[in-house]
Image: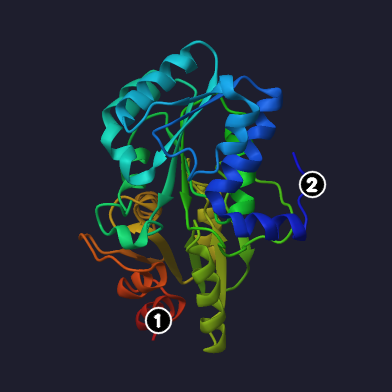
Amino acid sequence: MQELNKRTIRTWSRLGQRRTFFGEAIPEIAENKNIMVTAADCGETSGISRFRKSFPDKYVNVGIAEQNLIGISAGLAKEGACVFATTYAIFTLRCLEQIRQNCGYMGFNVKVVGASAGFAMDIGGSTHHAIEDIAAMRAIPNMTVVSPADAAEAYLAAHAVSEINTPVYVRLTGQANCPMIYSEPYDFKIGKGVVLKKGTDIALIGNGILLAEVQKTAEILEEKGVSCTVVNMHTIKPLDTELLDELFNNHKLIVTVEEHNIIGGLGSAVAEYKATLSNAPRQIIIGVPDCFGKAGEYMYLLEQYGLTAAQIAETTRSFTL
């Protein structure tokens, strides 16, 4: 692995999650592991060019045929390869049956990488906005679900998932020039959330690129006298219930924020666990309403769905005043 420092992380931030994941981490992993990369005609936009040139025998472009993508990837995994299969996140839903049967049911070592999740395909409109993918993937038995917070964490996640011999869905969000959550290296562990800031009143839990707005939300609320804990819950499945227990015991309100449908995502995962407990605090689930939406630039879309920092803070305060 490369040495992570502020300069490197800043460079990766300019590249974005996809190009850091496939252009930086995957070529490194290929030097020491038997991996294959398969793509549904999105190799260039996902930053796979460097990998393809260095390891031409380890790359397969199946074309715009996502169901074949998963079938071929499962076959390669059956022969012993760790396979990174990528397409745009919205199109992973085209091959949900194949992911269920060939990855989850068979337990094959396929890492399904959903690129441009959430609103990353901004002007493409609702047909290209992946806001249901977490719900679908976490419902598949044996499937781990990870959503990195920035480009540096995408790099760390690539290395981490390559170390486990199980199917994984990696959700890559944002575009180039994505916000930086981390400015120095840390020990990324699958299934272990990260407390970015400690407070006493409210626990704000998020993941993906939207976590940058969650951090700004905490700053706004702090100015209003509300003390906030900020948590990066990068792994939605398996959920870090040990950390959740700590948050539930020490906060009056839990707020989950996600660039995903309010049904079936991070908020639902937290609520499902919370429902098994007695005397757990109240929870607000902030995300994309259960509807098909608009087309527009990324920040415009966040504003339309109440997902900017100011809007998240206002929604949160309406439950605490």
Q: Where is residue 268 in the image (x, y as percent from the top left)?
A: 34, 53
Q: Which amino acid does label 1 sit on?
A: Thr
Front residue of 159/46: it is 46
Left or right relative to 166: residue 120: left
Residue with the mark numbered 1? 320
Residue 155 visible, this orientation: yes
Whether 215 is drawn above or below 139: the answer is below
Q: Which residue lies furthest to the top in this view?
A: 79
User: Can you tell which mark lies on residue 201?
Assistant: none
- Name the colour scheme: rainbow
Q: Nearer the viewer, mark 1 or mark 2?
A: 2
For residue 316, above or below residue 20: below
Q: Is residue 234 left or right of residue 159?
A: left
Q: Mark 2 points at which residue?
A: 3
| Nearer-the-camera pick, 98 or 214 | 98
Quick check: can you spot residue 189?
no
Residue placed at 21% from the left, 59% from the top? 292
- Name the residue rendered at 39%, 82% in the picture: 314
* 10 Å crowding of disc 1: few (<14), some (14-19), many (20+): few
x and y, in percent, of residue 78 in the image = 47, 12
Q: Quadrant of the C terminus?
A: bottom left
Mark 1: secondary structure: helix
Q: Tell me if residue 277 comes above or below residue 95 in the rendering.
A: below
Label 2: which secondary element: loop
Q: Residues within 10 Å of mark 2 (few under 14, many from 20)?
A: few
Q: In this view, does 286 lie above or below 79?
A: below
Q: Which residue is drawn at 31% across and 41% down?
A: 91
Where residue 227 appears, as percent x and y from the top left, is 56, 79
Q: How many marks?
A: 2
Disc 2 marks a residue whose amino acid type is Glu
Percent coordinates x, y for residue 13 in the rendering: 62, 59
